[in-house]
Image: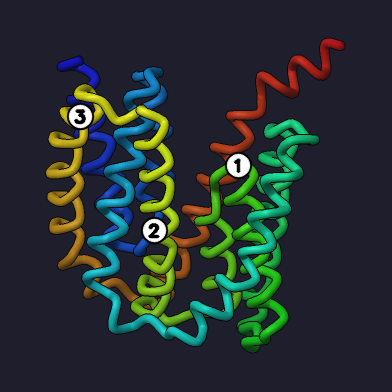
């Protein structure tokens, strides 16, 4: 487990640094790095605990930028999305849902690049908030991923960097709920607690190292960083579905 711990510490130091800059992306960066070297279920659960810890740090740093009205307007529509996502997963392969999210992200990146080239910004609309909230709930309930949809919404709305960081931290309660469910399933054992005890301080160091850069980062750089993270999310989703696509092509 010593080698596994070193991998988790290094991955979370990098992931938390990115999270400290943008307010999101810690798990998106850290988990693929970890699973590339470590395939154990323990590593995944450690990342869930550490990711929630990083989310709490982000909330602590940016809670004053959170608009309760906007957050509620986003997450209330997510509730029926979660219910539908859970039901859809029973009838549809997870890989197909991952491909769907991957396709949506790619379309968004193209739209955003065109919007940036035109020098325009989508005016805030309630419908967009409700649609993105529902989509975040749907993909959160079906494949456990809602961060990319939140990033798409913040990017489309040209959200101020600190406001966006606060907005991203509003998803932290979902992480706490996941931890309760994992604990109820008996998956938090000694190995998980030991791994988290090492990974969490590494993540804290990553967030602390990112703070000076987070304060100085320009809005356009922040905006570009979100697009890069979304690109990484799309590549990660596509990579995860490759075995499924190969299997389908061989039939």
Mark positioned earlier in the residue sequence (3 or 1): 1
Res 195 label: 3
Q: Where residue 169 sits: x, y (%)? A: 37, 66
Camera-near label (2 vs 1) is 1
What residue sits right under mark 1 in the picture?
143
* Up-down relation of residue 169 to residue 157 (above or below): above
Q: Secondary structure at mark 2?
A: loop
- Is 92 rendered above or below residue 118? above
Within 10 angstroms of label 3, few (less than 14), some, or many (20 or more) residues? many
Name which quarter of the figure residue 110 lies in. Answer: bottom right
- Residue lying at 22% horizontally and 70% vertically, measured from the top left: 60
| Label 2, residues with CA under 10 Å away: few <14, some 14-19, many ≥20 | many
Image-quadrant location for residue 61: bottom left
Mark number displayed over residue 24: 2
Asked if residue 245 lies left or right of residue 154, the reply is right
Q: CA distance from mark 2 to mark 1?
A: 18 Å
Badge nearest the viewer, 3 or 2: 3
Q: Is the C terminus in the top left, top right, bottom left or bottom right quadrant?
A: top right
Between 138 and 35, which is closer to the camera in this rendering? 138
* Label 3: which secondary element: helix
């Amino acid at each position: 487990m010593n080698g596994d711990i070193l991998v988790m510490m290094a991955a979370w130091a990098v992931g938390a640094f990115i999270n400290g800059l943008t307010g999101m992306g810690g798990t998106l960066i850290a988990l693929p790095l970890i699973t590339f070297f470590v395939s154990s279920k323990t590593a995944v659960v450690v990342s869930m605990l550490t990711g929630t810890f990083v989310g709490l740090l982000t909330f602590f740093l940016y809670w004053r930028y959170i608009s309760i009205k906007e957050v509620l307007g986003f997450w209330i529509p997510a509730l029926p999305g979660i219910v539908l996502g859970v039901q859809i997963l029973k009838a549809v392969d997870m890989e197909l849902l991952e491909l769907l999210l991957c396709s949506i992200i790619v379309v968004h990146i193209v739209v955003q690049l065109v919007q940036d080239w035109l020098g325009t910004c989508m005016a805030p609309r309630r419908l967009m908030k409700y649609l993105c909230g529902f989509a975040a709930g749907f993909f959160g309930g079906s494949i456990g991923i809602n961060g990319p949809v939140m990033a798409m919404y913040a990017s489309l709305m040209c959200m101020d960097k600190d406001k966006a960081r606060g907005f991203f931290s509003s998803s932290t309660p979902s992480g706490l709920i996941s931890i309760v469910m994992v604990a109820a399933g008996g998956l938090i054992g000694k190995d998980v607690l030991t791994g988290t005890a090492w990974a969490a301080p590494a993540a804290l160091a990553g967030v602390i190292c990112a703070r000076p850069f987070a304060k100085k980062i320009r809005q356009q750089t922040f905006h570009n960083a979100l697009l890069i993270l979304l690109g990484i999310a799309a590549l990660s989703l596509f990579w995860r579905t490759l075995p499924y696509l190969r299997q389908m092509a061989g039939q």
